[in-house]
Image (cartoon, grey):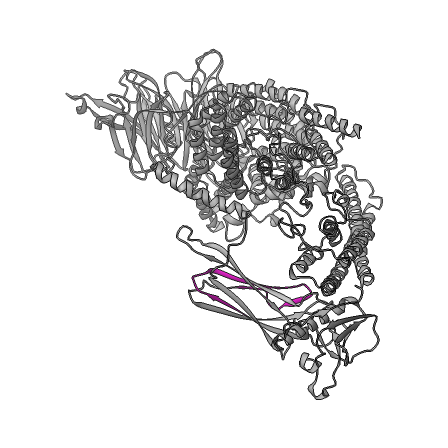
Amino acid sequence: EPLFQAWSYFRRRKFRECADVCSQLLERPPGEQELDSEYSVFQAAWNLKTRALTEMVYVDEIDMDQEGIAEIVLDENAIAQVARPGTSLKLPGTSQGGGPSPAVRPVTQSGRPITGFVRPSTQSGRPSTMEQAIRTPRTALTARPITSASGGYGRLGTASMLTNPDGPFINLSRLNLTKYAQKPKLAKALFEYIFHHENDVKNALDLAALATEHAQFKDWWWKVQIGKCYYRLGLYREAEKQFKSALKQQDMVDTILYLAKVYLRLDQPVTALNLFKQGLERFPGEVTLICGIARIYEEMNNISSAAEYYKDVLKQDNTHVEAIACIGSNHFYSDQPEIALRFYRRLLQMGVYNCQLFNNLGLCCFYAQQYDMTLSSFERALFLAENEEETADVWYNLGHVAVGIGDLNLAYQCFKLTLVHNNDYAEAYNNLAVLEMRKGHTEQARALLQTASSLAPHMYEPHFNVAILSEKVGDLQRSYTAAQKSEEAFPGHVDTQQLMKQLKEHFAML
Amino acid sequence: MSLFKARDWWSTILGEKEEFDQGCLCVADVDNSGSGQDKVIVGSYKGYLRIFNPHPVKPGDEVQPEDLLLEVQLREPILQVEVGKFVSGTEGLHLAVLHCRKLCVYAVSGTQGNVEHGNQYQIKLMYEHNLQRTACNMTYGPFGGVKGRDLICIQSMDGMLMLFEQESYAFGRFLPGFLLPGPLAYSSRTDSFITVSSCQQVESYKYQVLAFATDADDRQDTEQQKLSSGKRLAVDWVLNIGEQALDICVVSFNQGVSSVFVLGERNFFCLKDNGQIRFMKKLDYSPSCFIPYCSVQEGTINTLIANHSKMLNVYQDVTLKWATQLPCIPVSVKVANFQDLKGVIVTLSDDGHLQCSYLGTDPSLFQAPKVDSREINYEEMNAEMKELQKIIREATKTQDILPESEKQRDVTVTAEVSPDLDEESQAIDSEIKAGAVPSVTVKVTIQSRVTAQKPSLAVCVQAPLAVTCDQFVFGDLEPDSSETVVLSVFLRENCCPSELEGTCIVSYNIPTELNPEGIPRVAQCNFSLPLKLICFPAQPSKAANHKLTIDTNKPPISFVTLFPDFVDPSEGDQANVLGFEFLTGSKTTLLASKTSQRYRIQSDQLEDLWLVTKELIHRLQIYFKKQNCKDFACTFSGSIPLQEYFELIDRHFELRLNAERFQELLSERAVQFRAIERRLLTRFKDKTPAPLQHLDTLLEGTFREVIALADAAEENQANMFQAFAKLKSATHLVIMLISLWQKLSADQVAILEATFLPLAEDTQELGWEETVDAAVSYLLRTCLSKSSKEQALTLSSQLSMPKDTSKLKKNITLFCDRLAKGGRLSLGTDSATQQAAVMPGGCATIPESDLEERTIIPGSTAMFSSNGQITKQKSKP
């Protein structure tokens, strides 16, 4: 029985086979199938194939979070420019304490501490103007927004071209959406197909609007789908309305997550937090909700709360990789490398096997004074590195270790190798400059520092080093300006303040 | 991702290339042995029915032959096997097997043999039903509250529920709004059937309602079936879960509550009897099957969920209690009791891997693959290390990246410019209107002595000139072979080039033993183009704005011998006047004094003098070289035409200012444009349509303005390009005049050129003016300085566009004065011409080298950015 076969394939997630069997069913002459019209094999096969094609490219919409320049610039949702401390994600400095200083924990370009787990949203920042957005250097690890949202979404949409060499399965432009909207059983599958497979948000929205009307606005599912479409189109307020109305009808975890995502996009982390907490009352112990809270706290620079919630996540689901990684990196940056080591080892035991993990293991081993393991960890990390950036990271850390054990020659070579692999590596430039400074090559050091600061204006180290260098040389004016920049990047840096004070005294004497 | 793997208690692989799905596994004491020992019943799509009684001697043993109690091949594929009290008059368990079009109920019985392997098992067909429609799945239970027996309900592929009261067929009902079958379960507490429909809803139908509804089978013809669709089966309750379900289970472990568990594609729901959500859990993996199995704690239920990443998770309500690794993806999971072991997890995979396992703290044996580490021979390593360090040291000594010494050239490239212009011009899309644009043929030959991979040739000439083809890619060159290409050079844009030179560059790879892909190498050569390419002889003109006089120490040479390609020999010997007309239209005249040893060049424009002057001096030098006359020298006595030169600088600078203004305007308009766009967007998004209030007109207008501004900026850029070309020509001329005037050596000329002709492109951010200003003032401060006071002056490290050119002019004038007073250009011991080189890290900053300030004490206390850059890049599992 072909239809049963297809159905079984679908249940076993063998979508390719399922779609093939369905295609065969659909190729039969239509006369046979229209015998009983209440139920037709044709419709069933069509529906099944639609679903199979969708599942092949399905990506959970909640995890998709990329903001392009165009969206940022044309974002007309008025948001308070000067938010009160602790209520906005835009002002990274507004943490209410508890956050580590940049001297201890490196920050991303938008000024947030580096997190232990790379997810799509950690890479997006919100520059204030178009010009600034474009001028931000394009390096893989920085917060430059992607040029357009079509980046990620577009790639998803191309699936439709790949799968069927003889044209798309459903020709969207010829669909009579009204007809389908009246058949709820077909409409849902069709909607998911249009949304996920064809990536045609406008048509999807049309269909959803018609369908929800047909369901007399009583189907929460359609409301969520409309909300999703609005979100994609950047109509956040409308999306919020839809999600809220859906939540009124039926509490669902997904709906809560979508709504929270809208709030985050509207830069209202506190509202999102409250929403998550309400959701937790309804669905106690839901991992995704707790994890959402932890992520928000982390972005708001409230690391201690974030760690608490990550621990809660682990209580509910002790195999949660993100939570383990984040707690591990948190311990690492709060001077507990031994504990961090245990977390990373746990990840290793769970079967995570990649360059980053060994990189982190190597660093933890080094700081925990287990020198024998350090080099072999880095060796493995190098062996596993998939691209140049990863290799550069490993060499940078090796250079760091070399500095730690006092082998400056090795350190020098390691940093050079870092730059060979990734010549945008501002940290490596900075450290190389310091090494050059020790050798007394002032000009080279200065050139390197200048490169570093132009590559990563958000780091305070190059500025500070320039300040010190200039002060040594006697160029007080330049030292002062550099110190000012350093202070701008990291207001609480004590050494900078001391230097500034010293310089001001000098100026006063003159 | 898990720490542990499921411990194997007993496992086997069934058949070859057989397929199994959800319904194919059942665990029960099917032969009514009464010992409470479960048997594992497996049916396959190939039609094999197997019954196992696993009892390994010790965990993980091989399968014993006597474990397989029974293996029968039934003719049709088996969709589902269930065990229940299906035969009337007895409470014994029987086996129901669902085929596509048939339902069979068998009795399984065993006869004891003398030894264990002598036990015999057989099945006996009790009854069978032939089905009208293709079956999909079935469920059973005491429908309608009957005691002591189980009824069977079969769901067909087209949505009919067929109910069988044991040996007899009871009735069939169509489900309303049916499209594809979903999982089916029976809840005995509420006496209802629960399924998930194609509308992504959990639906519950009371058995009573089904029984009293009109019988679908009464109407045989299809017409009436259509009618029956109008009359809807009343649904007890509906819950929209917004996704398709994989399986449904109804459990009631403790008497109080019974729950309906629904495993969706992305979520896991637990519902109350009345269809309300008790709890739900979002799954971050795609589940394959599940089974709720018991409740340890009051009010909680434990569930096993298997997923497609080969994991089996144990949940207590929503809390993950245990996660374990399975060897394959299960399609069905059950919990069984064997011998003295309770709660064994039985899993069946798609391809027939049947496993009985238990949870244990056996680490999931993930062995990190070994890094290929060599046996370490410390002596060899030491030697190699020393060798390498030596190389590194040498490399660091001789600057970082320097071209290797060109001892032997593996690949040579030569360019040969044909002495005559092309008979038929090869010029394409030249902007010059005047008639035919001449072109000249260049023949480039590449000779290789070794194997060169992927050689590619690039030919470049300065911008107003162009070549017909500037890129050539060849196949790999064999040793001692050569390639030749021919191309033509012509003047494309309507302005005079500042140089009549071109470069050919060949890049290629040389493979070595260690590096089969090859080491990239480059070979290059220069060629100079004839003057005739851009000008032709014309009538000399007497009057001109600019005049230059070059003195020599030899009697003047006739132009007939000097410029044979411009002077018609028929004009006779008296040709001491020669006129040139450039393709761009301007004219230059060359005069040779008959009596004194002088030449005069005159033109209306300063920049036009350059090429002719250069050509003249060049030809004179060649001529006297041929004559073996070594003491030939040219000199220039007159004052340097600085005033005219400054005019050109001003012109260029003015255009730069313009460009800056255009840029500002453009960004202003762009901001305005975006603001209007944003307003429009809010208007359009508003629910209540508001009038546009001419915003669209405004948008249109701004758009036009932006385009017009962009056009103007582009035109300005073209002008600037021309101005820069002129400026460059004039600069060349000035350099040449200075060197003739002061009789500078070749080294000094090189310094001059580096000063006035920076290698960097002329851009808006870093233009010619500030670069030259910085270079000139550096020279003034160092080698041309008069007092040590001047040396102490510091320069700003940041180069930015000056407000006007007065400082530059002042500096250049001063520079000429100092030179006239006998200043010597030298750069001391330090690396030469650094000020013109572009430092790494962009051209925005050019640090000057502090020659005098090199007395810093090493050992600064600068700090490290002591951050281990930790990046974790992982996608969520």
x then y, percent, for residue B80: 37, 31
Q: Residue at x 75, y 49 (%)?
A: B785
Position of B367 with respect to B858 (left or right) is: left
Q: Is residue B46 left or right of residue A253?
A: left
| Residue B107 coordinates in the image, percent (x, y) | 28, 25
Q: Is residue B215 above or below residue B533?
A: above
| Vertical order, B863 against B770 (above or below) | above
**Residue B452: x and y, percent?**
45, 61
Q: Quadrant of the N terminus of chain B?
A: top left
Residue A484 or B64: which is nearer the viewer? A484
Q: Which residues are magenta?
A: B444-472
Residue B159 relative to residue B784: left or right = left
In the image, taking residue B528 as reference, residue B66 lies left or right, namely left
| Quarter location, residue B332 | top left
Q: Position of residue B591 (x, y in %)?
A: 77, 77
Which sits in the foreground, A376 or B93? A376
**Res. A373 visible in picture:** yes
Please report the residue visible at 71 percent of the width from the left and 78 percent of the height from the top: B555
